[in-house]
Image (tube, rainbow, N blue to C red):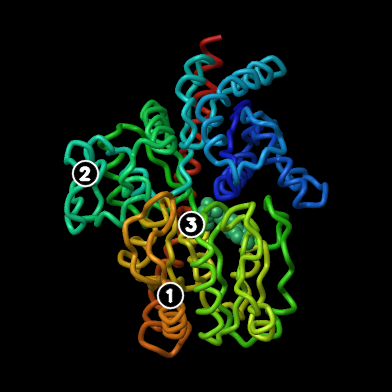
Amino acid sequence: MSNVHAVLFMYPFQGHIIPAYNLAKKLAAKGVLATLVCTHGCYARIIKAHNGHDPFAHNVHSIRLALVSDGLPQDFDRSLNHLEFEESLLNKMEFHVEKLMEDLQRKGPPISCIITDTFYVWPDRIAKKFGIPHVSFWTEPAMVFSIYYHWDLIIKNGHYPFTGDEGELINYIPGAPALKLTDLPSYLQERDVTTLTHKSIFQAFQSARAADWIVSNTVEELDKQTIEKLQIQSGIPFCSVGPLLQPKGEVGTSMWAESDCRSWLDSKPKNSVLYVSFGSHAHVSKAQIHEMAMGLLHSKWPFIWVLRPDVVASDVQDLLPDGFEEKSKDQGLVVEWVSQVDVLSHSSVGGFLTHCGWNSILESLWLGVPMLAFPLLTDQYTNCRLIVQQWGVAMSLGHISRSSNNLRSTLVLRQEIALTITEFMNMDGQEGKRLRCNIGSVRDVMKKAVMNGGSSQNNLEGFIDYLKGIELSHFSSE
Ligand code: UDP
């Protein structure tokens, strides 16, 4: 065990918690004392989803859990009142972080560094206050980081807010290919760029510019050119250690109670089931849910559909069209949440209709499941570009038009959904064969990266050496 003590602040969203927890486990396995910080609100939801049990208590490594307030009462409905939640993360949480840091310092051992999700706005100030380095933890692809990092270039080129011809290309992001407006993260596509979200992300990237290291849940080989250029431009080491995945069968950190679909999946033929999920955060209009439901039904393929209770809004119930349950009972399952890694690893699952969240993509690639891309929000549009055009491991579902008000703006209709699913799920068709062949190659790259001598493994070791170096320099200055 070394004397390195890293305090890792998880961002309070499911897609950020999973990779952060798995990073903490990797650090702890290498002898780093990791204090993992979760917000009270998030922790309460995780415990509730696990019937009062604490999934973090199952970890076998030396990870300590600490809780911090995000500035709101524990039972506040953060999904329904997203603006208040964002406002609190932006303006109120820092005060509580500072108090927690003081408390942790007092109790010891001394803190060597903070590792903070890139979307927090306060890491540079906290690091400065406590005289320690700051590592920014990025949970999305390098290309998305690079786009946000070069926000100034987008402004300089008159593309923010984007008012010009939507066919115009953004061809000046270092290391990135020429991008269409709809390839950008949704917030950069919007006409109104004065929202709290824009302010938060902008401030978060100002803070990330002062980071000593960037550690990312991606794989170097998949995004090499962007990473090389980014490191030159920023002068900050960009260290890819992905994929940071929830191990199959291990107790996860789900914020919703998981349904067990194993026996249903066991009863289905190999590669016959379409798994459908829109992730933990994005919202979809009720009209789109209805079109999706009817599209699934008309396609006739077996499906498991994760429909979060708050997928439209947490005060909107009765999400499905009348009679859907009865009509689909022999064809599919609708559930609130599952262990996605377990579902994707089942041999009956032949495809994943995904909102293109980065964790979902990594999991699908890792398990060799081709994707049908249906981006909804944030980085999902850029991720969609990567999986459809760059790597050829996904088909696109429906026309993607400019994002507006945090929602996908054009409705994809049932006929198109049914036809696309039929083409996508046909393993013997040209498209099916092409996707499966490409996914095999990407999967090989990922598997190699995490083996001894692979890029992610080497980068992780380089990062641990850096952490140990901090500890030595602390030591010698005492
Ligand atoms: N997930 C899950 N069960 C579900 C739906 C999602 O375990 O029913 C997990 C999924 O495996 C992934 C995470 O939730 O690790 C979602 O992260 P992602 O980046 O894909 O999307 P986000 O939720 O951030 O939009």
Q: Nearer the viewer, mark 1 or mark 3?
A: 1
The answer to which of marks 2 and 1 sits earlier in the sequence is: 2
Tell which quarter ligand 1 is in. Answer: bottom right
Q: With 423 as the anchor, is 1 left or right in this view?
A: right
Tell me where residue 89 appears, x and y as whole percent.
54, 31
Q: With 457 as the anchor, is 110 left or right in this view?
A: right
Residue 81 can be seen in this image? yes
**Other-residue count near label 3 (Cα within 10 Å), few / some / many at <14 / 14–19 / ≥20:** many
Q: Nearer the viewer, mark 2 or mark 1?
A: 1
The kind of residue on which mark 3 rests is Gly
Tell me whether the residue at label 2 lies in contact with that at label 1, contact meaning CB atoms closer than 8 angstroms: no
At x 46%, y 53%, the residue is 453
Q: Point out the residue furthest to the front here.
A: 322
Tell me where residue 96 appears, x and y as whole percent.
62, 22
Secondary structure under the numbered disc 2 in the rendered image? loop
From mark 3 to mark 2, how far is it between C-alphas?
A: 25 Å
Q: Is ligand 1 closer than 8 angstroms to the Cβ of mark 3? A: yes
From mark 2 to mark 1, how far is it between C-alphas?
A: 31 Å
The kind of residue on which mark 1 rests is Leu
What is the number of the mark on residue 413?
Answer: 1
Q: Point out the residue furthest to the right here.
A: 52
Tell me whether the residue at label 3 lies in contact with that at label 2, contact meaning CB atoms closer than 8 angstroms: no
